[in-house]
Image (cartoon, rainbow, N blue to C red):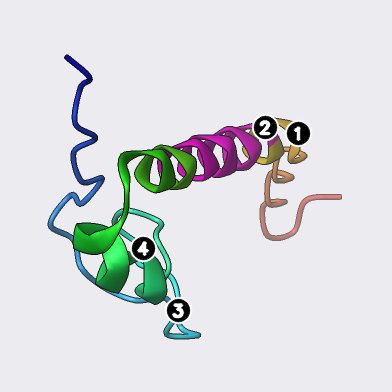
Amino acid sequence: MPTTVSTPCVATCTLDAGGRICIGCGRTIEEIGAWSRMSESERRAVMARLAASRAADAAATARAPARPARMREGAR
């Protein structure tokens, strides 16, 4: 029996500044609205996109240069 894809919702339902992406689960407002009507394959596609997005974000964070230490006042 196939496993049903559960919702990626983490109950932090807040949209980004553009009003299109939930900062909790990462789905678009359209994906959230259509979730209950999506097929299992459509849900799996959304979950794969979310995983790829998280991986890309983690890789970008790892590549980001370290912030320089602030110089103390008067240091030369």
Mark 4–mark 2 Cα distance, whole angstroms, equals 18 Å
In the rendering, at what x and y percent does residue 58 appear? 58, 34
The reply to whether the C-beta atoms of the residues labelled 1 and 2 are less than 8 Å apart is: yes
Residue 63's disc number: 1
**SS class, disc 1:** helix
Q: Secondary structure at mark 3?
A: loop
User: Where is 24 relative to 60, above or below?
Assistant: below
The structure residue drawn at horizontal position 31% and vertical position 40%, both measured from the top left corner, is 40
Query: Which mark lies nearer to you, 4 or 3?
Result: 3
Q: Which residue is mark 2?
A: 59
Q: Is residue 48 magenta?
A: yes
Instruction: Work out whether mark 4 precedes mark 2 in sequence or the reverse, and give the earlier one.
Output: 4
Q: Residues within 10 Å of mark 4 (few under 14, many from 20)?
A: some
Residue at numbered disc 4: 23
Q: Amino acid at mark 4?
A: Ile
Q: Which mark is residue 20?
A: 3
Report the quarter where the N terminus lies. top left
Evaluate if marks 3 and 2 touch, with contact meaning CB atoms under 8 Å apart.
no
Marks 3 and 2: which is nearer the front? 3
Name the front one of labels 4 and 1: 4
